[in-house]
Image (tube, rainbow, N blue to C red):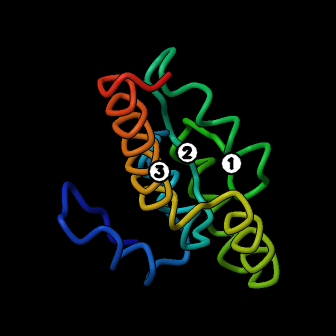
Amino acid sequence: VVPLGFVSNMAEYMVAADILVSKAGPGTIAEAAAVGLPIMVTSHLPGQEAGNVDIVLNGEFGDFCQDPETIGLEIACWLQDPQLLDVMSKKAKTVGHPHAAEEIALDIGKTTHQWMEQNELKRNGHP
């Protein structure tokens, strides 16, 4: 177990880790799912992060628990069951979208160009 505060190379840690223990931050969950990392969610901000817990639970690639002793017990069980970790990892990858940011940026760029062309046609008197 290696507790970390803020680090700038989180992706490297996630790829090397067996399990992530974290609050339900949307970016953290998305990054973990993209690399197939099972997650133990320990907390969430009311409202804005509550739905992120459901993503982990419904995707079956982690659990939610707030009690430190129970968290330790469950993680120990996960670590002693490589087959379970493998299943959870595969389920995480089905939820993860590792190229989502690139796809969104390309879609925004394509849409922007389409609108620019349409606006140019309108300026030149074409409907």
Q: Position of residue 75 (x, y in %)?
A: 62, 63
Closest to the observer, 36 or 106: 106
How far apart are the alpha carbons under marks 3 and 1? 29 Å
> Is 21 above or below relative to 91?
above
- Choose the circle earlier in sequence order: 2 or 3: 2
Q: Residues within 10 Å of mark 2 (few under 14, many from 20)?
A: many
Please name the residue shown 48% across and 16% down the image. Answer: 46
Q: In terms of secondary structure, where does tag 3 sit?
A: helix
Q: Quadrant of residue 34?
A: bottom right
Labels 1 & 2 near each other (Cβ < 8 A):
yes
Please name the residue shown 50% across and 58% down the image. Answer: 103
In the rendered structure, find residue 119 and report the number of the disc placed on it.
Answer: none
Q: Residues within 10 Å of mark 1 (few under 14, many from 20)?
A: many
Q: In terms of secondary structure, where does tag 2 sit?
A: strand
Q: Position of residue 125 (x, y in %)?
A: 37, 22
In the rendered structure, find residue 104 and report the number of the disc placed on it.
Answer: 3
> What amino acid type should be assigned to the residue bearing mark 3?
Ile
How far apart are the alpha carbons under marks 2 and 3? 27 Å
> What amino acid type should be assigned to the residue bearing mark 2?
Val
Q: Which residue is mark 1?
A: 63
Mark 2 or 3, which is nearer the eye?
A: 3
Labels 3 & 1 near each other (Cβ < 8 A):
no
Q: Which residue is mark 2?
A: 41
How far apart are the alpha carbons under marks 1 and 2? 6 Å
Q: Is residue 85 left or right of residue 15?
A: right
